[in-house]
Amino acid sequence: MRLLKDNIKIVHFSLLLSCLNFLFFHFPFFKFIFNNIDYKSFNGITIIICFIILMLVANAFAFFLMFFLLRFVGKIILALCFIVNAIAVYFINTYSVIIDGGMVGNVLNTNYAEAAGFFSIKLLLYVILLGVIPAIIIIKAKIAYVTFKRFLVIASATLLFMLIVVFANAKNWLWVDKNSPVLGGLAMPWSYTVNLSLHFIHKHQENEKEILLPDATIKDNRKSVVVLVIGESARSENFSLYGYSKNTNPFLSKTPGVFHFNATSCATYTTAGVKCILEHKNTGDLYEILPNYLYRNGVEVVWRTTNWGEPPVHIKNYQGREALMKDCKGDGCNYDEVLLSNLKEQIAASTKNKVLIILHTSTSHGPEYSKKYPPRFETFKPVCNSVELAKCSSTELVNAYDNTIGYTDYILYNVIEDLKQLKEYKSAMIFVSDHGESLGEKNLYMHGMPLSLAPKQQYDIPFIVWTSDNSLKQLKTENSLSQDYVFHSVLNFLGIQSPVYNEELNIFK
């Protein structure tokens, strides 16, 4: 290619790459615009033209600055941007995600096993064709640079031109502001570069120091245990306890003392959802979370997990999959049943009267739903076995997901059966999901949409409670709960007195 052999002017190369970036990565961006304006009206046409001009000029300007100021380093950065763009647009096209701050946090907290589950030939083709090949061209291209004086003239003229276009479109600023979360999440490479920066800024602010809550007091010596099960991507719509037509809760539906509440999550992704479940109120700050708080105040706290994404947990007994596998027996150990390994024995061995067990599951996390449960739980068939969910029929996809709900039902039933055998304890099991899940409704898959735009499937969650007969605890008849109820309900059941306790957010009478 002549592009790799001959010198190419920096302005021409910047414009060329901006055009490629526009063609390769911005179909979802303009699809959203077309779906949300009257593109046959003069105003609609104005919005489209202005965005096309700004997209091409702004990206060319950014690339021009990168090449001139950073030289070869700028080449490397832009080459990496094309590769990341390719990955990002694959997920946007395949799962209808939006690369906002929450999604960036989700990606950074994804472990290797979850990430590997997304691999497909289609993803590889995206990366090679839209990412690697342009990256090679960028690295090998010989750029003819301009003088510093010429650089200033070009930069000033370009900025002035962009300002003129922006102010000429001033009457549409309200429309842009209203749709900015989606537009910003679909513009490449700004969706992830800006949100990545914001994510680390917020993380730094949050982790500067955990804000301790006022000291709590244990009110009595009665043996009490709560098992809090944090669900993953479980939506209430697919639980037969909530009226779903398929029997996805064959065990819980026959278990006396099981009650379910309508509930919503405060977010549509794991890190924020788990934080909401564990904190005393929904804030942007990092307050002391439930396990840390109770552990510091003399409660036996155990955290068992096959998942990730929780805030910092400061307790002695934190057990991941590998630690739990050592004493686990049977095929279920390769799935979330590993969380139940010697659970009853661990509670009985506690030297303290108040015990909190947290089980953080991963059962319904996509896209590989069919790999989240043992083969004997494949009740609903046929199932989707592809990570490219849009390739599966709706029936296959929903069947695979429903089997994960059936497996969750079995796990919760076994938690209850274990607690029933601990006669000396008054016991409670609370199950609440971190968020819901989309299964192709409105062409959306999985989760992570901004809450203001997300469909109900991504935030309507199950909130299921069981209490032992000897607890003498009755439940309030609340119409709808939030994740904020967990913190205060656990305090109430365990008999913990605290200045931050809120009776209005307690489910027990």
Image (spheres, helix red, strand yellow):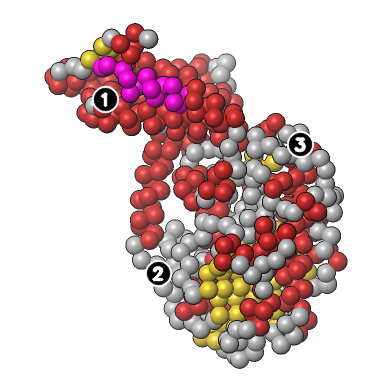
Residue 337 falls left or right of residue 27: right
- Work out whether mark 3 precedes mark 2 in sequence or the reverse, and give the earlier one: 2
Q: Is residue 63 above or below residue 484?
A: above
Q: Position of residue 413 (x, y in %)?
A: 77, 67
Q: Secondary structure at mark 3?
A: helix
How crowded is the residue under tag 1: few (<14 C-alpha within 10 Å), some, or many (20+)?
A: many
Q: Amino acid at mark 2?
A: Ile
Q: Magenta residues: mostly which secondary structure? A: helix
Specify the quadrant that holds the C terminus.
Answer: bottom right
Q: Which residue is mark 1?
A: 67
Residue found 52% across the figure and 66% down from its top = 279
Q: Position of residue 447 (x, y in %)?
A: 60, 45
Quarter of the image where one finds residue 408: bottom right
**Residue 331 in sight here:** yes
Q: Secondary structure at mark 1?
A: helix
How crowded is the residue under tag 3: few (<14 C-alpha within 10 Å), some, or many (20+)?
A: some
Question: Which mark is nearer the camera, 2 or 1?
Answer: 1
Q: Residue 405 magenta-drawn?
A: no
Specify the quadrant that holds the N terminus.
Answer: top left
Residue 172 falls left or right of residue 168: right
Q: Is residue 75 above or below residue 234?
A: above
Disc number placed over residue 394 in the picture, else none: 3
Q: Which residue is mark 2?
A: 211
How crowded is the residue under tag 2: few (<14 C-alpha within 10 Å), some, or many (20+)?
A: few
Q: Secondary structure at mark 2?
A: loop
Q: Which residues are magenta?
A: 130-143
Q: Is residue 507 above or below residue 448?
A: below
Residue found 65% across the figure and 87% down from its top = 223
